[in-house]
Image (cartoon, rainbow, N blue to C red):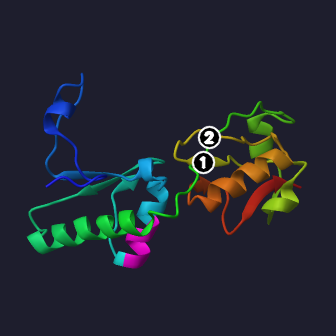
Amino acid sequence: KRHRGLFLDKEEVENQLGCNYDESKLLINLYDKGITGGTVEKVLRESYGVYTELWDIQYDLAYVSPADSIDDIRYLFNSVKEISENFKDEVQESPEFEVFKPNKKLSIREAFYSNKKKVNLEDGINSTSGDFIIPYPPGIPVICPGELIEDKHVEYFKRLMDENVDILGIEDNCISILK
């Protein structure tokens, strides 16, 4: 039975160059309802005890194995269905990934070997980064060691964190800057 967000046609996949259909994987996509992959992952984990294998801005990938019972698969399906129905009137804006021109103050090597300290994200504005800051997805560095952290970066990171995007280099709302 088809359900929006859970159906992927085998022929549709296999007709694309370089794609194969894998019946052990369930691709979840509620992005057209304004629900990001990160939000689906978080709600599945926190509210239903279901862990997906990986996610990006649009999709979550779940594996089904011979160890899973029909009831397990139904539970996953019904959990996603409930998320889809509960978010009907709560459409979220999906984060826009931005590209910033780097403002390099030191080489990565110089920054790597410099003394660093951890500060609150907001307190790092106008400081030189001591680490990479990488939203995942997509996994592309926004800030590299030795680059200036500006207020536009901090606002961007806050927006992404509000959308449940993981950001490597930010831990407990703190970042590494040069002393």
* As drawn, 8 above or below 66: above
Q: How many marks?
A: 2
How packed is label 2: few (under 14 Cα within 10 Å), some, or many (20 or more)?
some
Q: Residues within 10 Å of mark 1 (few under 14, many from 20)?
A: some
Q: Is residue 39 left or right of residue 143?
A: left
- Asked if the magenta segment contains residue 174, the reply would be no
Q: Quadrant of residue 20?
A: top left
Asked if the stretch drawn in magenta spans residue 45, the answer is yes
Span shown in magenta:
42-47
Question: What secondary structure do most residues of the magenta stretch adopt?
Answer: helix
x, y percent for residue 173: 71, 66
Name the residue carrying label 1. 95
Q: Secondary structure at mark 2?
A: loop
Residue 32 x/y as whole percent: 43, 47
Q: Does residue 119 lie above or below 3 as drawn?
A: below
Return the residue nearer the eye: 22 or 82.
82
Q: Is residue 16 above or below residue 133?
A: above
Q: In the orientation shown, which residue stands out farthest toward the front?
A: 89
| Percent of width and height locating residue 130 | 77, 50
Please report contact status of discs 2 and 1: CB closer than 8 Å, yes or no: yes
Q: Nearer the viewer, residue 134 or 85?
A: 85
- Pointer 2 residue: 97
